[in-house]
Image (cartoon, rainbow, N blue to C red):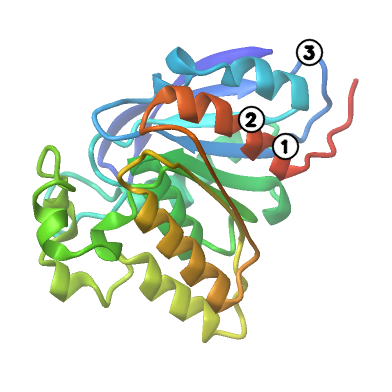
Amino acid sequence: MALLQTEFRSETLKRAVLFNVILPIEKFKPPYPTLYLLHGLTDNMNGWLHNTRIKMWAENCGLAVVMPSGENSFYLDVLVKDGCLGDFGEYVGRELVDVTREMFPLSRKREDTFICGLSMGGFGACRNGLKYCDTFGKVGVLSGAVHIYESPEEWVETEGNTIGEVRNFGVLEETRGTDRNPRFLIQQIKNDPQKSFPDFYVACGLQDQLITANRSIAEALKEAGANVTYEEGPGVHDFIFWDTYIQHVLKWLDLHTEAK
């Protein structure tokens, strides 16, 4: 297994960025199926490495894993286009995929390209998995912070707004009908015969305050025709739950990689 930290200058983010990559080079032959794995609010690209056993599991199943830093962006494009912050949605949905495919022996097939995340990263995976549905064949949402448009606005502005992250979404009533809202993207795909849904895996802990929102978005995906696997079990919003359920995600991916 190779664990690499890589830097390049991102055009979409308008600055130099770092990301981590796991490559199962010792046991499996390339090109590798690839999981773009997104961290949660206030964390960075090291969160999954420090708090789960993703290195071991990726090596065992022949999966490449790319872990970028999304800052506190919710993996959305900025609303102010003449600023210098950059577009995190386009970064993880297009640029990072293109760059890593050029750098590493990754599969370029949609059916081998996946995106997953926890909490804020779960929202980012859901939104960008839908927006870039031609790129990602499967999407994993773990305790997704999908409550912004799924929950009452008063609750979102108070209990669902821990460090001011709701401001990333603009005025909610104005942006509800835009691609910041996964439900808007769900309807776009449903109504476009040229597009198809990725498969979805959604999981949330029974004691997690976001469980109602996760149930809601999973049901919306099912009603629109997406293939959805939904699971819930004992747990709160923490790495104990995510360390367990990322294993469920890897099993659900149903990888058929070629050993050396």
Q: Earlier in the sequence, mark 3 or mark 2?
A: 3
Q: CA distance from mark 2 to mark 1?
A: 6 Å
The tag on residue 247 is 2
Q: CA distance from mark 3 to mark 2?
A: 21 Å
The residue where tag 3 is placed is: 26
Which quadrant holds residue 173? bottom left
Residue 176, percent from left and from top: 24, 73
Q: Residue at x 56, y 27 (%)?
A: 244
Which quadrant holds residue 118? top left
Residue 257, percent from left and from top: 84, 34
Residue sitting nearer the eye, 132 or 61 = 61
Residue sitting nearer the eye, 172 or 136 = 172
Type of amino acid at the residue the image marks with label 2: Gln
Q: Quadrant of the N terminus?
A: top right
Q: How many marks?
A: 3
**What secondary structure is marked by label 1?**
helix
Inspect this view and state whether residue 19 appears: no
Which quadrant holds residue 8? top left
Q: Are marks 3 and 2 in contact (CB under 8 Å)?
A: no
Type of amino acid at the residue the image marks with label 1: Lys
Q: Residue at x 33, y 48 (%)?
A: 210
Q: Is residue 152 above or below residue 27?
A: below
Q: Residue at x 51, y 42 (%)?
A: 116
Q: Quadrant of the C terminus?
A: top right
The tag on residue 251 is 1
**What secondary structure is marked by label 2?**
helix
Q: Are marks 2 and 1 in contact (CB under 8 Å)?
A: yes
Q: Residue at x 64, y 36 (%)?
A: 248
